[in-house]
Every structure is written in structure tokens, then in C-alpha cells.
Amino acid sequence: MPYFDAASAAPLHPVARQALHASLDEGWADPARLHREGRRARLLLDAAREAAAEAVGCRPDELVFTPSGTQAIHTGISGALAGRRRVGRRLVVSAVEHSAVLTAAAAWEAAGGSVTEVGVDRHGAVSPDTYAAELGSATALACLQSANHEVGTEQPVREVAEACRAVGVPLLVDAAQSLAWGPVDADWSLLTASAHKWGGPAGVGLLAVRKGVRFAPQGPADERESGRSAGFENIPAIVAAAASLRAVRAEAADEAVRLRALVDRIRARVPELVPDVEVVGDPVRRLPHVVTFSCLYVDGETLLHELDRAGFSVSSGSSCTSSTLIPSHVLRAMGVLSEGNVRVSLPPSGTSEEDVDRFLEVLPGVVAGVRERYGAPVPAGPVSSGPMSSPSSSPSPSPGPAKSLVVDALGRRCPIPVIELAKVIGDVPVGGTVTVLSDDEAARLDIPAWCGMRGQEYVGEQGAEQGVAYKVRRVV
Amino acid sequence: MPYFDAASAAPLHPVARQALHASLDEGWADPARLHREGRRARLLLDAAREAAAEAVGCRPDELVFTPSGTQAIHTGISGALAGRRRVGRRLVVSAVEHSAVLTAAAAWEAAGGSVTEVGVDRHGAVSPDTYAAELGSATALACLQSANHEVGTEQPVREVAEACRAVGVPLLVDAAQSLAWGPVDADWSLLTASAHKWGGPAGVGLLAVRKGVRFAPQGPADERESGRSAGFENIPAIVAAAASLRAVRAEAADEAVRLRALVDRIRARVPELVPDVEVVGDPVRRLPHVVTFSCLYVDGETLLHELDRAGFSVSSGSSCTSSTLIPSHVLRAMGVLSEGNVRVSLPPSGTSEEDVDRFLEVLPGVVAGVRERYGAPVPAGPVSSGPMSSPSSSPSPSPGPAKSLVVDALGRRCPIPVIELAKVIGDVPVGGTVTVLSDDEAARLDIPAWCGMRGQEYVGEQGAEQGVAYKVRRVV
């Protein structure tokens, strides 16, 4: 059963399992104690720190283990901000950071700090120049992920790090998605990562803080991990994390080539096989193992469910798959379609060509089935030249149609508002408008995205008595 | 090789190992995901929560898993204090709480809150009346451990909980040391614990917050664990923690009887076998598996080292075994001797009668060896009626001695200042005084304790040009 959600959590690497096993007998004691069990635990912890530091590209005394990547991020951000309190209170982040960065930024703002979000292009990447322009003199810290977790786009970390260095602002790089593939090739000041993303066990994050970076750990004092991560160290998991990082690195070059080819195949074939699909994320500057696309007229949850029934585990940034009913902030920042969103992230050493081929076989039928259930508009014929070529419904309006129509989709969730829009667009003449009333957060993203994909004009939104009125002008 | 430091960390219980193993294959995925791997992980997490909640004595939705007992305490305290911000800013704690409670209290104080420390008696227990008297109307939270981690004394949690309930103050009970033995039999509001104390794996703490208790989690928001513990859940470890808690509970009644008898033997025999020893902690209201004693004229680090060489792993609250050079805050709060401190904590199912007998055989020689190395005063003869019966050196002062002596022990660490005092006390006549100049933090505790053990009068301390002058009057 192919598991295509490695970017959420990778299955345990065999080396991690072995190391965990072996160190359960040796690494359970308190490394702060002077007895032999404590000393043994300390030795394991020190050795794991050396191995992890080597893989990260830092000194062992610059690296601490945290209980998760999230906590590494929270601790790294709060400690760096506090350490540079006198310099200023501004935190600069990209708009597509992991939620752990954005929630830390929100907490900072709630505590009186200021936060600047740097926007991204349609591929999800920041522009180094735009980022650099935001680095004012009162900036205490800048954060940029090495690569995006939802669409796989690599960020220009090296250029942004240079810009930060030029103005003396420390840069925290969240390397959670990329560390398995190699060290971050940039002059970072702080770096965070998470072991379960590379096939290590849960319960281990990394926080590296370069010597010379001002850092003041927040929260109650604790002697463990240089005062940077409170609580008893989980040494067996730490040992397993370090050992598996080394192991995945040894396989990284070959696996990157292999998975990149598989992802290229998905990127090319999905739009050929499935009508009305948008593949998102940078096609070249990207992680080797991640590909994301969105399907018009489909809700992400049903799609996930049907793919799961067909044996494929994927994830989605669609609003209907989150508890908040808001589409992924990454897709929003990119301004791309969010409905029917699917992220495929292939686990290294665990994905065969056959798995990918079978996925490509299964996907068209699954998407068609979900669309049929929704009564979504059917493309005019076999898709020949990509998803954007054919308008969704018959372009022959009945005689004397209204110049404008209003569709009431209040209370209806994604993808219904877009489906309703697509159903009636043919009922107004070219030049006429359709206004969709919707209180679904996804509509704000998906109606303009639909217009872009169908060649219609998105006029804009305005507040309505209930929800929001989205206006579309028929062009084709 | 007997390991007698279960109160620091217990070796992994066989059930924990099995459960960890089994759930590595099933529990590595993200339980927030909708695919089958995610659902499987979620099922394991839910089942573990039910099992742990049953053992704690709360509802599953009142309990979250944290990455450590320390983080459970930090989160519990900060969340409860924030939740009752409008009621007041006072935090009441006992003076002998785990350092995680005291550092959280210090952080609270640094942030503008107020902290009241309730003192303890010589056995290390708070008085319920004294504790109740401190619960003013502006008290936001009270904390009391179920039993002390260094000396094993049980606290009157039930009575203190009643007093808290009467004035509407929530009580947080740190049950880290006692949860293996049974649920906390008191009407608590919040409860914390740590899996590696009961033979579960590292990386798992418990935080229970009763419904109705006002609680506002601090720090960046995170959806996991009801918003009360940030970061990816360590499900295999959580499953192992819950399974092993159930397992140790099944064995608890029998093991408590067995270990209590072994501890009773240590408590009775150590003072008979080793001169100048003080056994500390409540002899009756105590944990079944912990016994602590302090040996005059011995430094804890050397004692630990020699016991380790003899095959016994113990821990110590002596200042020379900590990185801070300050004796354990627990021993200080109790006002008992801190030098040569040894905590023996027997792991359930892992301690045989023979281990304890061998410890009792080895200990006297080890202590005598360390004392000899320090040139410590030798007891007058075989000890017959307990440690307090014989003065340390010959009571025949040479003719015409000084009425008072000053001993300069500046720059000398525990146990030297006390040894120097003991060496010269016989040189002043009864009624004469010895003043010890010391800059060692342990002297403040150990010189009065020595006076108590030797039947001499402790006059008091006063500031000196360097360090502190401790004055002792010879009585016997």
C-alpha cells in the first residue's frame, strides 16, 4: 500500500529502528548522573550530538536536541528575539513558513512585537530582493524555510542569508523538509529540523545556534541541553535520529535522482490525464520528492478518502481537510487554486516506479467519480492540450438571458460555490457577470483561481449582507 | 550490577519495550491526517490516552501527553496561572517541590508574579495548616508534590487539596514519584507525571487538567493535544508509557510491600553499620522504594564514585555532586545534613534482597575509606547506641587551651569545613567556641546539622570579610 505522505511523517528508517532498539538498553538513564548508567547515557548523547552536528554542518556545542521540530522553532525564535531585544522588535518571516513559525510570530505580535510577512510568487518562493528590502534596522530576526512543506518549492536561502548577513540580522532557517537531502548551503545563524521527517523517530527536533548569535532562552530555566530545551533527554530516540540522518544522507544523492524523475512524471502526466488540474510549486527549484496539484470541482476530503480507499495515502491543503475550514496558508499566499488539493510526497527508499504508475492509473477515475457525485460540469471532450483550453460548459446561452446572474451559495462549502459558478457562467452572454454569494473561506481563493484557469475575468469581491459577493465577468 | 537510582529514571519495563516495538510500525504517522496510517496512529493515541486517564483517575479528555514531566509542569503552571489572571498573581508552592516547579515559580516571579514558598518539617513534609494559611484570596494556583523525589516523604496532599477546594484555589499535584504506586488520592485540579519514572520510555509526560479548571495555554498556539502541548506526538513512546503504567500498577501492591521491607532494613541497618549517619525523610509516610541518608565527613561525589566502583548506582543531593555547588534545596529546606548524601531508590521488579544485603555489606567500608582519605575524625569506638552518642574527638583538651578558636576554611569545599571543625572542637574547653570561616554554601547547612548530631551548640552565623563566620559552642 503506497504511502505518499512522507512530508508529514516518514516511516521509521531501518537504521533508526536498529539504533533505537540498541540504545534502549544503554540510554534510558539520566545523563546528568555520575553512575555508570548515567555515564553511558551521556556518552550516547554526546556521540549523537556529534553525528547530528556533522550532518547539519555546525559544531556539536552549537546544537541541542528538542522534543520536536515545532519546539525547536518556538525555542529558536523566542530565544533569538529575546537575545536581540535591544536591537529591535521586528520579526521578518515568509508568508509560506511552517505553521510553527507563523504561530510563534503571532505570539510575538500578541506580546507587543511586530511581524513582517514577505509574500511569495505563484510558485511559492520569496524574492531575495523583496526579502532584503524588509530587513530594516529594527529587525531582530528573520526566518526562512529551506524548502516549502506543501508545494516543495526551494527558497533562495543562500541569497537571503547574504542579505541578512549584510545588515547584521540573524537568519533562522527551518530545514525540516530538506535536511534529509543535504546540509543547508547558506550562511545561516539558527537552524531547525525534525527527525520524523527524515525517517527518524518522533520526539526529536534539532536546534542549532551559531556561536556568536545572541540567544536568551525563554521560559523556566533548565540545565539540560545547554539551557535551551527543558526536560529529560530522550536519548534512545536521539541516537536513532542521528543514526538515521546519517543513513538517509548516504542514500540521498541516488534517491534524489530517482524520486525527482518520478515526480517529473507525475507533474507531466497528471494534467494530461485529469482535466481541470493545476500543478503548483516550482517545477525546477524544488524538493526531489514532493509534488502538489489541485483539481477543480472536487473537495479535498472526499478525494483523500477515495485515494485512501484505492490504497494511496496523500495529504491536502484544501480547507475541507483542516479543522479550521480555511485553505492552507501556503496556497493562499501563492494565490493558487485550493480545492481538490493533493500533495504527493514520496518516501525515500520506499517508493517504486510501479507505485507511481498505479497512482497515475487510479487518479483520473477517482477525480471523475468525485466530480460526478457533485454534478460538476463535464469538460467538452477529451482533453488534448492541457486543462485550460476548454470552457467548462456549453457556450450557447439560451435566448434573452439575464445580463447578470446572482448565485446564492451561502452555507455551501468548497467546491460547491465554484461548481455553481461554472454551471451558470454559460447562461450569461459574453460581457455579462455572475456574482457568487459565499461565506466559504475557500471561495476567496478558488473563484479567482477558477477564472484564471477558465479564461474568465475576476472582477472582485465586496461585502454582502451575508458572506461575500464575488463577481465574475464572462469573457469566453 | 544493582541500579539504585530509580527515582531519577527507571530502566525500561519489559511491557514498555514490547509496546514501543509493536507501535513503531503502527504509530509513526501523523494522527491528524485522514489516511489509513494517520487513522491507525490516532487510534493508538486515543487508546493510550484512555489507559493513562484510567490510571490517573481522570477523563481522557482531561489528559494530554507532553514531551516530559518537566514540560507538563511548566505548561500546567503557566496555563493555570494565566487562566486565573483576574483572580490574582500569587503562586503557592512547597519549598521541596521538584526543580521544574521551582524554576517555573522563579520565571513567574521574574515576570511580575508573586511566589510563596511553604516550608517543611525536618522530615520534608508540609503542614496542611501552614499550607492552608498561605492560601490568600489573590492566590491563582497552589502546587504540591504527592511525594518528595529526594527523601521519599509523602505530602498531605488530600488535606491540602481540601483546604484549596475550600477557598477555590486550584491545586496542581506533581505526582512524578508516586504515580507508579497508585492514583493520587486527593481532589486535585491539575496533575503532572513523567513516564520514565515508572519504567516507561523517555519523552512522555502527563498533564491532566480537570474540567472546569480555568486554563489558558501559553506560548505559540498549536492544535495538537487540545492546544496544551505543541509538536508532533511521539505515539510509540506514548503507547509504551500507557502500557507500562498499567503493568507497574498491576504489580504495585506486592512490590510496595516487598520494597518497603527492604527500605526498612536499610533505614534500620545503615545507622548501626556506619557511624555518624543521619537517615532523613519520614520513616512511615513515605514512598515504598526511596531511602536517603547523609554521612558526616564525606563528600557526596567521592562516595558516589566509590559506590559506583563497588557496583551500586545511587544519587546524591550533596553540593559537590551538582553543577551549582549548592546542596539540594530539599535538604536545605529540611535543615538536615547535606554532606555525604546518598539517595537509594529501588526499581520495582529489579531489586533483590541480596542486592540490598550486599549494599549494606559494602557501604561501611566505602564510607570509612572516604573518611580516612579526608583524615576525618574517627569515632571513639564501636557504635552502640546510634550516631548521636559519641563526640567526635577526645574530650581531654590540653592544658590552657584558647577559649575560642577560628578555623579558616575559605576556599575549601564540603566536607572539609565540617571536618576542620570536628578536628579542633576538642581543643577548646566546654563553653569555648570555634568559629569556622567558610565560603562553601554547604557549610550553612552542614555546620548546624553537625552540631545537632554531635550535641554541640550552634550559635549562629555572621558575615565576614570573606565568606561567612559560623560560630559553634562546645557543650560536650
Image (spheres, coloured by chain):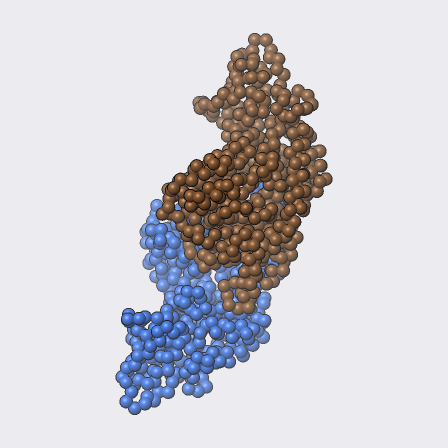
Chain colours: A blue, B brown
Q: In the rendered view, would you say B442 is above or below A427?
A: above
> In front here: A127 or B420?
B420
User: Which quadrant, please, contains the N terminus of chain A?
Assistant: bottom right
Q: In the rendered view, would you say B249 is above or below B310?
A: below
Residue drawn at x 38%, y 56% is A106
Residue drawn at x 61%, y 43% is B6
Would residue B312 be seen by someone viewing this image from the given angle?
no
Left or right, residue A357 beside residue A323: right
* Residue B19, image quadrant: bottom right
Residue A52, percent from left and from top: 54, 53
Residue A198, percent from left and from top: 54, 60
Left or right, residue A254 beside residue A153: right
User: Which quadrant, please, contains the C terminus of chain A?
Assistant: bottom left
> In front here: B106 or B282?
B282
Q: In the rendered view, would you say A268 is above or below B294?
A: below
Residue drawn at x 35%, y 76% is A409
Residue B447, percent from left and from top: 54, 25
Residue drawn at x 70%, y 42% is B352
* Residue B419, image quadrant: top right
Q: How many marks?
A: 0
Residue A2, percent from left and from top: 57, 71
Would residue A465 be seen by someone viewing this image from the given angle?
yes
